[in-house]
Image: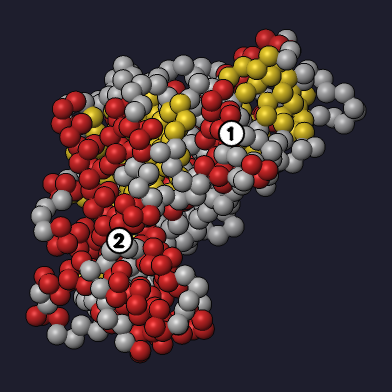
Amino acid sequence: METKEKDTLLIISIIGLLLLGNVSSAVAAQFDSNSSVNFTNSTNCESPVTSEAKVKNVIILIPDGCSQSVETLARWYSGKPLELDNMVTGTVSTYSTDSVITDSSSAATAFASGYKTTNGFLSVGPSNSSVLSTLEIPPEELRYRPLATVLEGSKLEGKATGLVATSRVSHATPAAFAAHVDNRDNETEIMKQMVYENIDVVFGGGSSYLTPVADGGKRKDGENLTKTLLDRCYQYVDSRDEMMNLTTGRAWGLFASSHMMPDIDRSSLAPEEPSLAEMTEKSIELLSQDKNGFFLMVEGSQVDWANHANDPNYAVTDFLAFDKAVTVAVDFAKKDGNTLVIAFPDHNTGGMTIGSNSDSNYTSTTVEDVIAPLKGMKLSSTGLETKIGTDLSSENIKKQLKTWWGIDATDEDITEILKLYNNEKGLSLDYAISEVISRNHTVIGWTTHGHSGDDVPLWAYGPDHLTGHVDNTEIAGYIAKELGFDLNKTNSCLFTEVGEVFSKDNGDGKLDKNEYLLNTTDSSNPVLQIGDDKLPVNTNILIKNGVAHELEGIVVYAPVTGKVYIPSGALSLINETNGIKKNFV
C-alpha cells in the first residue's frame, strides 16, 4: 500500500478513537500533525490559533475538471508561456471515499475540510455505504457530520472571506467551502446556508436560487434571500459595470440566473457579465482592505463542462481565462509579499490528449494541425447549439458549423452527429457535435465524457508553498497551518451535536428548558427548539425572547441521522436564557 494511503487509513482510524475519547497524547499529537479533526465540545470560538500565522492571505484557484494536457494545449494556442507555467510544484491525488474517480463535491470537500467523503456530499462526513477497499470504514460518529472548512476557519480568525465562480455559486466547488449538505443538487438549501455564512464577497451566477418561485426563482420555501442580503447590509450587483463601481464593503454579485457564459461566448451573448479575471481582481480589491487578511477561492468552473462536452476550444479558452485570473492573484501576491497562491484542478475530465486515434501520422503533427481547427471556432459548443436551434436539418447544422466553427462538415459528419444525439448514446446536441468534430476534424483525442481518476497538477506561488505529491485532503490542513488556525478547534467551535448536550423532547407536550425538538411543521424551513429558544436550520440565527442573535456559524441538520449541529457560541446564549448548568468543555 502506498504511504499516503496508509496515512489516510491511520487518520480515519484515529478519528474514531478521538471521537470516543480513547486516544493517548502521543497518538493525538500525530493526529494533529495530519490536520484531522478532534470533535470535542467547546464554547471558545474566539481564537482557534495554534501558532503564529506564516501568511496573511491565501488565494485558491481551481480550474475545474482538467489536466496537464489542457495547459499544454493552451500554451500552443496562445503562442506564449502561461502564468501557471512558472508555478508548477507537484501533483495532487483526487479519489473520494467511495470511488477512484471523484466528483466535484467530494473533491472540494477534501481540500476545503481535510476529509474525503462520498461523491455528491458537500463538507459532511461519508455515508459508509460504499468505501474503497484500500480504506478503512470511517467511524460511525463521522457519518453525515458537518465538517468545518478553511473558509469558516479563516472567518473565525477574523479574516475576510470570498468565493468566485463562473458557475452558480451554489454549485459543487464553491458550495463545499460554505455549506454542509449530503446532496449537491439541493441548491436552494445550499444557497441559504451560503447567505447566512456571512461571506464578505461572493461573485458568480445563480441568482434564481435567491428568489422564490412566485418571483420567477427556484426557491420553494418562499424566502427572498436577495432581501436577506440587503437587510444584512450587503451591496448586491448584477452586472459588470455595477461590480466595477464597488470600492469597499461586503458584496454579492450574481450575474446570471443560472451559470455564467463560457468565456468565448461572453462578448457576443452576455457582454454585461464580468470575466473571471475581473471578478478576481475586484474580490481582492475589496477583501484586501481587511487588516486581518483574507481567504479567497476562485473557480474557473467551465473548463470542466468543456471537457465533459469534448469541446477543445471551449476548454482552452476558458483555461486561458482562468490563467488570467491566476495572473491577477500572483501580481497581487508579488506586491503584497505575504500572500500564498495555490492552484490545482479538483479532478480531470474528458481525458484530453494532443493526439487521437484518427491521427495515424502523429509524428509529423504541426502546430497548425493542433491549433488551426480551434482558431476558427467563435463560440462554445453550447453557444453553437443555441445558434442551431430547433432546425436539425443537415443543411442548417452544416451552415452553423461553417459560420461559427469554420468547419466544412460532411454528410457523414452530420449523420454521425444525429446518430449520437438521437440513438446510440443519447448525447446532448453540443456533446454529439463536439465528439464528432474533434474526432474527424482535429488531432485532439478524448477518452470519456465523464471524469477520470488520474492525478492533477499542483501550482503554487508565495512563501512556504506546497511541493511534491500531495493528497487533496492535505491541502486544507496546510492552508489552516499557514494561516495560523486549527481545523480541529474550528470543528469544535462550529458543530456541537445537540443531543450530546441537551435531552430530546420527552413527548409530554411541554418543552422543558433543557430539552430540544426539531420542528418540521414547515418542512422547507425546519426550526430547532431548545427550551424557549429557536434556531432556524441553515441560518446563523438564535431567537430568544423575540430577539435575533447572530451566531459564529450556521445550524446544520443531517436528515439521515436525525442529528442537529449548532455553533458552541449558541450554548452560552442558551445557558444564559434557560439557566442550564452544564459543562460544555
Left or right placement of residue 37 versus residue 297 in this view: right
- Residue 276 vertical position relative to residue 410 in the rendered view, above or below: above
Q: Position of residue 374 (x, y in %)?
A: 23, 68
- Residue 411 vertical position relative to residue 384 in the rendered view, above or below: below
Q: Residues within 10 Å of mark 1 (few under 14, many from 20)?
A: some
Q: Position of residue 162 (x, y in %)?
A: 39, 32
Q: Position of residue 233 (x, y in %)?
A: 50, 21
> Which numbered disc, 1 or 2, marks the residue that appears first in the sequence?
1
Location of the C terminus by quadrant is top right
Left or right placement of residue 279 versus residue 177 in this view: left
| Residue pictured at 52% horizontal, 39% vertical | 179
Quarter assignment of residue 312: bottom left
Quarter assignment of residue 571: top right
Residue 308 appears in view: no
Asked which secondary structure carries label 1, the reply is helix
The residue tagged 2 is 315
| Residue pictured at 51% horizontal, 81% vertical | 422
The residue tagged 1 is 225
| Residue pictured at 42% horizontal, 24% vertical | 250
Asked which colour scheme the image uses, the reply is secondary structure
Asked which secondary structure carries label 2, the reply is helix
Mark 2 is on which residue type? Ala
Taking depth in this image into account, of 399 and 362 the one nearest to the observer is 399
Mark 1 is on which residue type? Leu
Taking depth in this image into account, of 312 and 153 the one nearest to the observer is 312
Label 1 and label 2: CA atoms lie apart by 33 Å
Left or right placement of residue 315 versus residue 231 in this view: left
Residue 442 appears in view: yes
Location of the N terminus by quadrant is bottom left
- Residue 240 vertical position relative to residue 358 in the rendered view, above or below: above
